[in-house]
Amino acid sequence: MEIDQILFKKFLRFYKKARAQNDPEREQRTARLSILKQRLTVLARALTGAAAELYTAEEEGGLKGPVLFLPATMSFFPTLEMNVNYYLFRTFYHCSAYLLPLPQVPPGTTLSAARSMALSQSAAVLPRLFAEYPPLEKIHDEMRSYLESREAPPGLHWLYGKLMPVTAKESGEALKNAGNRPAGQSGKKAKTEIKARPVEEREVVQIDREAQEQFVLTHNFEKVETIEEFNGIWRSFDGNDELKAHEEALNELNLRHTVRADDPVHSIYQAEMVENEGIPEAADRSDEAYCLLYDEWDSKNATYKRDYCKVYPRVSVQSDMNYVQKTLRSNKSILLSLRKTFAGFHNRLNRVKRLNMGDDIDLDALTDFHADIRARHAPDEKIYTSKRKLEKDLSILFLLDLSLSSDGYAAGNKVLDVEKQIGILLGELMYEYEVDFEIAGYYSKTRNYCSYLRAKAFDEDWQTAKAGVGGLQASGYTRIGPALRHAGRQLAEREARNKWLILLSDGKPNDYDKYEGRYGIEDIKQALRELSLQHIHSHAFAIEAQARYYLPMMFGKRNYHILSSPQELLKSFAVLYQRIRKV
Amino acid sequence: MIIEKEPYYHPIAREIETFEQCYANRLPVLLKGPTGTGKSRFIEYMAYRLGKDLITVTCHEETSSTDLIGRFLIKGSETVWQDGPLTTAVRRGSIIYLDEIAEARPDILVAIHSLTDYRRVLYMDKLGEEIKAHEDFFLAASFNPGYQKGFKELKPSTRQRFVALSFNYPEAAVETSIIKAETGLENGYAKKLVKIAGKIRNLTELGLTETVSTRLLVDAGKLIHTGLSPRLAAEVAIIEPLSDDPDISEALKDITTMML
């Protein structure tokens, strides 16, 4: 880079920073979507009755099916209350519009046309909105007159948004270039991670390996670095971590094309995007390795896709005893408290009555004893109660999500670490109380390669197996259904009466091929129903705060807990264990 | 308990007729449905309509067969037998209503088995006696499938011993008239409360453990009728009992603020 370019960049950064800091009054009145998002999501779901989602808009945003796009911040209005009301108005407005039979916008509509269509549609939406929610009329009128009174009116599209085409098209073409190598196994970690600008529209393109190989580098004889939007020309993924250097240029571009690739990740450009349900299914692949076939639920056609997923049961070969010891050392007090809680249940819930000897007198038995003597019958001498050890009529399978998303962080803790630490602590506890348990992990790379990695089998000794839990690594995607079905098969083979599957996961279902969104959620729900039919109970520990908005959809209202650290396990596990003992 | 005053009950479908036929045939009835949908009120109403004595037992996780059948008590130097509510009902020919039956210990299900089929007898193991049920004895129970989901389920063998009646939240017009009749509230507010309930019920799959029942709406209606501001009444009678999550509470307040 030339000296003048360096100077210009530095000046630009300084200017941007100074501008952001110079207006504390504006900062005070700014309402932020990140703060209001959860409240507005619940509101949108109540108003529409659909699984509505909220995303950050590129500008004013709008409505796209049950997805609302809203600006990241709002400071147009003079008070914080008005700016918060702006978000409320937009949510109520778009939810009312969603429930009206309004015409769809054809794809390819220009921005100005989409805005003017939204403005003309407001004539149909507003009367209904004000009739149902009268206070909104005043809020709307105040905001509109304020916007129109400004010297440079920002435009009414900020009130009504723009119309956005719903593009859930499904390509009939099967997914190509899906090898069996799980993503992220390069051994190197991505060093640079940058948040991208919001993206409203995205198109998934399939990698054209042939075009990549045939690409010829052309030299422009100009000493400039360029970066451009995807225009159909394929270049090879060179694998250099230059994201930081290109950050500003990337902010100028309209990035709408995504590819699914299994090349190693070198830097992460993280954008919040709408779930894409238009990802094609993977074509059938045959593999000689031993695998088990499982059905998958196709909610659209309410039928099973028979023998659709291949699950490869494997044994974890990587072990890390140091990790286990470190976990046990640093969580000593948690383990101690868990032991106390566990012992509490153990004793309280297993009081055995009518014994020949025991710690306490059984009053019912004593009354019978007394009655028998008075009636001149030979009394039963079993008049004591005692606390007995836990009956070992329980099998628990802990299923850990090993997908790459677990390599991320939740509340400052690495998700996979939280999962592994919880697994190790609970494993230690189960071992001490002689509970029959297994610890396994799962990841996937299309329906053809779902891995079920066993770290500690039911009949395996914990002392030797626990190093395997310490050695678990993140890789691949999150196809939960086949993992649940395979775990269910393991549990079904156990003789215990009380069987539990406990899932530790961070996130939503997704895979290299079609599994995102409603399709995956419905498959998981169906897999859980299958477990229930086999009298296997399920529970989820979600290591992610947002999970409370989608886990109930899969696991039901009470069958999950949200955690972000092993410390929070104490309370959640106490509640769960109470459930386990009551079943 | 003899019900002297006719309880208010708005029929939803043909449950009154069904119950009467079940009573005539002495077939036990299981009322299924979420909290606050009128199951207990229905039983009270039917007991009044049939002119029968009603004994209600609210089951909890410590309710055992001893609590239902009876126990020996020590009185001075003697042991005295005390009938439990089930035995009393069996002897007197009352209607017994076991509310939230799935919550109770499994041994009560064993105790009622012989009462639910053609035998209609109660075996009292502590006395070594078997009592033939009075001709008018009738057994009803309630069960909330949503609440007990994954927690405690009624075994199919138990469920098959009952005729089951399903209860759910009534349609908007019916619910409005129930609120009006129960609270004396004017039509406009009653309608608005029902509309708010409709929005909140959309959230059942999405995070709320229990949703707004007709009972909560009636409570809110009563508070509004006696002079509490509608928004505050909705907040204390509907929103606060439903959720402790600040985001959910705020979102529900947004709805009530905009609708009341």
Image: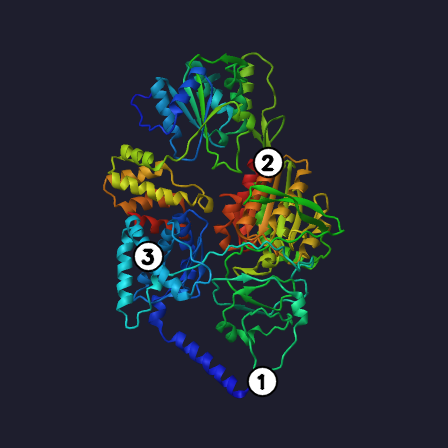
Q: Nearer the viewer, residue A248 or A378?
A: A248
Q: Amino acid at mark 2?
A: Leu
Residue A256 vertical position relative to residue A565 in the rendered view, above or below: below
Please tell me whether mark 2 sits on a helix, a strand or a loop. Answer: helix
Q: Can you tell which of label 1 and label 3 is closer to the viewer?
A: 3
Q: Amino acid at mark 1?
A: Lys
The Cα–Cα distance between marks 1 and 3, rounded to whole angstroms, is 51 Å
* Disc with the residue nearer the chain's start (1 vs 3): 3
Q: Amino acid at mark 3?
A: Ser
Q: Can you tell which of label 2 and label 3 is closer to the viewer?
A: 3
| Left or right: B46 in relation to B155 | left
Q: Which mark is residue A533?
A: 2
Q: Position of residue B189 (x, y in %)?
A: 27, 41
Q: Position of residue A328 (x, y in %)?
A: 64, 55
* Residue under numbered circle 3: A122
* Residue name at image x 55 percent, y 14 percent: B128
* Residue under numbered circle 1: A223
Q: Residue furthest bottom?
A: A3
